[in-house]
Amino acid sequence: MGLDLTGIGSVADFAKSLVDRFLPKSMTAAEKAEKQIQLQAVLERRENTVVEAKKSIMIAEVQQGDNFTKRARPSIVYFGLFAIGLVHVIFPIVAWIVLATTGETATQMPKISLPPQFWATWGGVCSIWIIGRSVEKKGSENKLVNKIASLITGGK
């Protein structure tokens, strides 16, 4: 099995690998193909069940009356902006004032920064939220695109 970035062949490849691994070698190619198709159907039903469960959870979150859950994505964006401002603006100003009042030189200022995990997580959340808001504001003819955008942004 190769690397499948799209996910299109993953169910078929997985089913084929299971058939090749666990079914007897004495089976004909036609019998193996039939078993592979049956296994693919089972795996696809399972995958569809998982996707539908995730979808129903997201729809339930959006339809509930708790406004904080609907605003959770923007809250993460605002918290990230607050953390960036605190670490990269407020702390350096406070450190500079403290050093200036004590007569120390600026070369002794501590180096502080947010960890790469913060930037990766916050950047990912912001990117997805911004894309969803852009699609939501622009509007789309495609109902599926609109539904996904409303799930991302917590809109209606």
Image: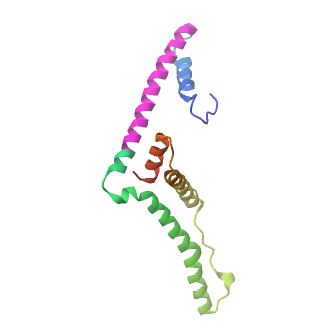
What residue appears at the point 49 percent right and 22 percent down from the top-left corner? Answer: 40
The answer to if 44 sits in the magenta stretch is yes
Relative to residue 25, is residue 78 drawn left or right?
Answer: left
Q: Position of residue 135 (x, y in %)?
A: 52, 50
| The quarter of the displayed image where residue 91 is located | bottom right
Where are the magenta residues, as a range?
Answer: 28-57
Q: Is residue 6 above or below residue 64?
A: above
Quick one: 124 or 120, which is closer to the camera? 124
Quick one: 70 or 7, which is closer to the camera? 70
Q: Position of residue 96 (x, y in %)?
A: 61, 84
Q: How is the model colour-coded?
A: rainbow
Direction front: furthest residue? 141
What residue appears at the point 55 percent right and 8 percent down from the top-left corner? Answer: 30
- Most common SS among magenta residues: helix
Q: Is residue 113 above or below residue 50?
A: below
Number of numbered discs visible in the structure rendering: 0
Q: Position of residue 4 (x, y in %)?
A: 61, 33
What residue appears at the point 64 percent right and 80 percent down from the top-left corner? Answer: 109
Q: Is residue 27 above or below residue 85?
A: above
Q: Which quadrant would the N terminus be assigned to in this image?
A: top right
Q: Position of residue 149 (x, y in %)?
A: 48, 48
Relative to residue 115, is residue 136 drawn left or right?
Answer: left
Direction left: furthest residue? 65
The answer to if 79 sits in the magenta stretch is no
Direction right: furthest residue? 107
Quick one: 116 or 146, which is closer to the camera? 146
